[in-house]
Image (cartoon, rainbow, N blue to C red):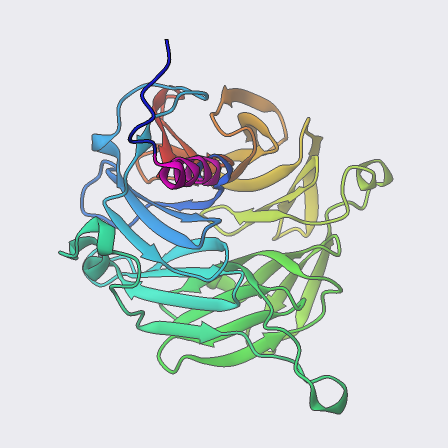
Amino acid sequence: MYGDATNWNEDAYKESILKDQEIQTLTVFRTAWPPSSNPNPNTIVLASSDGSLTSYSISEIPLGFSDLRAPQVKPNAFLQGHDGPAYDVKFYGNAEEDALLLSCGDDGRIRGWRWGEFMQSQVPGALQGNHIKPIVDLVNPQHKGPWGSLSPIPENNAIAVDTQGGSIFSAAGDSCAYWWDVETCKIKMCFKGHLDYLHCIVARNSANQIITGSEDGSARLWDCRSGKCIRVIDSLKDEKFKVLSSSVSCIALDASESWLACGSGRSLSVWNLSASECVSRMCTRASIQDVIFSDNQILAVGAEPVMSRFDINGAVLSQIPSAPQSAFSVSVHPSGVTAVGGYGGLVDIISQFGSHYCTFRCQ
């Protein structure tokens, strides 16, 4: 028996195939929890490889864990934040009504929107994308070459914020970190010293410092008063770890800003910054792509479908399966709920007890 091809629309069929492929290859590079007066997590924001910034309501997602048949969920708000991938998203400000939604991407921009305006927009979903104008729009400088030629605009791979200081810090593809003033939208300082592009950056606000991680295999502490590097951390000093990686792909500070975790390929090291010493190193089965502190523990995700939990001394406390075959982001809500995002546009929401609350695929 043959089907009726009278109403066959080949163009629509091709478009549906391309759309499905696009969704399957979408990568979530960053997840973030917005500031809220609600102690329970309800909204999560994603930065993705198509340059979009999207927010999802967790209460509207079906419960359960599925790595193969995760439901596709429509966002409740959407912005086309960047031309090219959006690599990071952060919130500037702790008050829900005044916070800025900041993002950076492959186009070399840092852009910021009012979070309240983003969430309360009355524009229909199909018309969203460029319906809200950013109030912050920063572009990395270009470098002059021979005969006055200009280099391409270097990408921004990560950002960090100091709300009290009115500052945004960015890790750029020209091996420099930039300190931006939010009020004037101008660069206050450029931190030079790395030998290759930067992957990650954190602000150590209590000490007026920033810490950067680079493809050159080092993490560096910078003094924001002088702009000078005050310490170089060689996360792969031990020869047996050098075969595992040659770059620092992710870093994280604990709440006291005294402990630093460095992910370098299949190696994770923990540093006591006050004592300037490494307290533990551990090998992992796959490359680590994001790391974060949760109380006195360290959560790490990477190129395997697992979220690992370590203690400060490097002991593995638990390994929880995750839907993304390769995860690029792990973030923790103040309640202890964790989000893991990665390849395939997949996001896992994991409860504070380690059980899966829900899994969804971005649409």
Residue in the picture at 18% in, 47% down: 37
Q: As drawn, which residue projects farthest toward the left?
A: 122
User: Can the viewer see residue 135?
Assistant: yes
Percent x, y of residue 130:
30, 63
Q: Quadrant of the C terminus?
A: top left
Q: Which quadrant would residue 263 be assigned to in this image?
A: top right
Q: Which quadrant would residue 164 be assigned to in this image?
A: bottom left
User: Can the viewer see residue 295?
Assistant: no
Residue in the picture at 38% in, 75% down: 182
In the displayed structure, does residue 241 sit left or right of residue 358? right
Q: Quadrant of the N terminus?
A: top left
Question: In front: 100, or 150?
Answer: 150
Q: Which residues are magenta?
A: 9-22
Magenta stretch mostly in which secondary structure? helix
Q: As drawn, which residue projects farthest toward the front?
A: 6
Question: In front: 17, or 218?
Answer: 17
Percent x, y of residue 163:
36, 65
Question: In front: 181, or 114?
Answer: 114
In the displayed structure, does residue 241 sit left or right of residue 281? right
Magenta stretch contains residue 12 = yes
**In the rendered image, the vertical position of residue 84 relative to residue 357, given as above or below:** below
Percent x, y of residue 128:
25, 56
Residue in the picture at 62% in, 52% down: 273
**In the rendered image, the vertical position of residue 336 relative to residue 162, given as above or below:** above
Magenta stretch contains residue 330 = no
